[in-house]
Image (cartoon, rainbow, N blue to C red):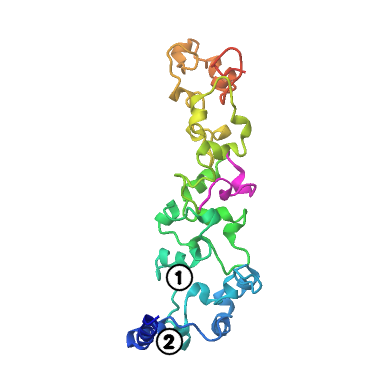
């Protein structure tokens, strides 16, 4: 108990040191919170007012920023900015402007609340490692955050993933461009459990959430199917039917090239009369081997119908 007065004295002395006073001044919150901020930022050019139509701007949700330090819950203590004559020179702790703070500094504010559930794998994920800031995708002041809208989400993703945008526009693929699917239907962009930020542990399990009929089990499995669906399919889009990466029989011949089998593409000289071989017409190999995802046919592992 004798040590208690000494401890109190130390705390008091530290609180009156010049360095501590300066640090406290730098971290000072404004006296009226959002009322101060909105004196300037109410103007439409700032795009701030729609935040009151979002969960972030809720005054009734105890977990929302506005029930705590309001604007400064995210932007940090801003008394110095408020008092400055030239406010452009004395900015808030976080402006969330590109190039002003690092992505980690900006994300720190978001992760104060959004660090659990589906965001638990953010640290070390592909996006986090690439210094992607939350505000690069999310517009927290908007009443309708585009990245949360299935119709607008892909446009946000395509700002970086431009190669995938060209795939989506190809004639065969998932209906992303029609708004019937969204990128987050397959990808968990906040997690890092796998290479492609998939919602499931691997490619096949992600595909099976919709294509359950391809899961099996079958008496006769097709090795590429059980290994990785993307060995044959491009999930983002293709110029070939069924989103295949190559046109059959060329796709099949990447693995099945046994000489003498009709699956080997014959040249005009080998056919004799210069016409196409009958086994290469229409669906090619799948004229006979229609059950390429697996078969229960008694003939065995040939995956025939």
Q: Residue at x 61, y 44 (%)?
A: 175
Of the residues under marks 2 and 1, which one precedes in the sequence? Answer: 2
Q: Is residue 89 visible?
A: no
- Residue at figure coordinates x 59%, y 60% from the top left: 146
Residue depicted at 47% across the width and 79% down the height: 77
Q: Position of residue 81 (x, y in %)?
A: 45, 83
| Image mark count | 2
Extent of the magenta region: 172-189
> From what the image shows, is residue 143 above or below residue 244?
below
Instruction: Work out which quarter of the rendered image holds the C terminus and state it.
Output: top right
Q: Is residue 214 left or right of residue 158?
A: right
Instruction: Read off the residue under disc 2.
Output: 86
Front in this rendered view, residue 271 or 123: 123
Q: Quadrant of the N terminus?
A: bottom left
The image's mark for residue 97 is: 1
- Provide residue 256's location: percent of width, then percent of height: 45, 20
Per the image, label 2 sits on a secondary structure element best described as loop
Magenta region includes residue 181: yes
What is the crowding at mark 1: few (fewer than 14 residues within 10 Å), some, or many (at least 20)? few
Query: Could you tell whether 105 is left or right of 298 in the image?
Result: left
């Amino acid at each position: 108990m004798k040590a208690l007065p000494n401890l109190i004295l130390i705390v008091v002395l530290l609180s009156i040191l010049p360095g501590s006073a300066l640090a406290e001044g730098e971290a000072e919150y404004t006296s009226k919170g959002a009322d101060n901020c909105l004196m300037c930022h109410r103007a439409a050019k700032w795009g701030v007012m729609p935040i009151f139509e979002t969960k972030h701007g809720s005054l009734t949700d105890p977990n929302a920023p506005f029930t705590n330090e309001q604007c400064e819950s995210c932007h940090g203590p801003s008394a110095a900015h408020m008092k400055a004559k030239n406010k452009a020179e004395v900015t808030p702790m976080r402006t969330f402007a590109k190039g002003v703070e690092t992505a980690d500094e900006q994300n720190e504010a978001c992760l104060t609340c959004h660090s659990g559930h589906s965001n638990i794998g953010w640290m070390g994920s592909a996006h986090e490692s690439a210094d992607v800031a939350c505000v690069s995708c999310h517009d927290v002041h908007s009443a309708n955050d585009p990245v949360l809208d299935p119709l607008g989400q892909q446009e946000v993703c395509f700002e970086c993933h431009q190669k995938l945008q060209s795939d989506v526009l190809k004639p065969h693929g998932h209906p992303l461009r029609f708004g019937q699917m969204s990128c987050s239907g397959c990808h968990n962009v906040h997690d890092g459990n796998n290479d492609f930020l998939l919602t499931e542990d691997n490619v096949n399990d992600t595909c099976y959430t919709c294509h359950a009929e391809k899961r099996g089990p079958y008496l006769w499995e097709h090795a590429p199917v059980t290994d990785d669906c993307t060995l044959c399919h491009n999930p983002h889009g293709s110029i070939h039917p069924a989103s295949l990466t190559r046109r059959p029989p060329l796709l099949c011949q990447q693995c099945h090239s046994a000489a003498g089998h009709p699956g080997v593409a014959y040249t005009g000289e080998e056919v004799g009369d210069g016409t196409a071989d009958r086994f290469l017409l229409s669906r090619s190999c799948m004229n006979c081997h229609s059950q390429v995802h697996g078969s229960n046919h008694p003939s065995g592992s040939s995956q025939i119908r």
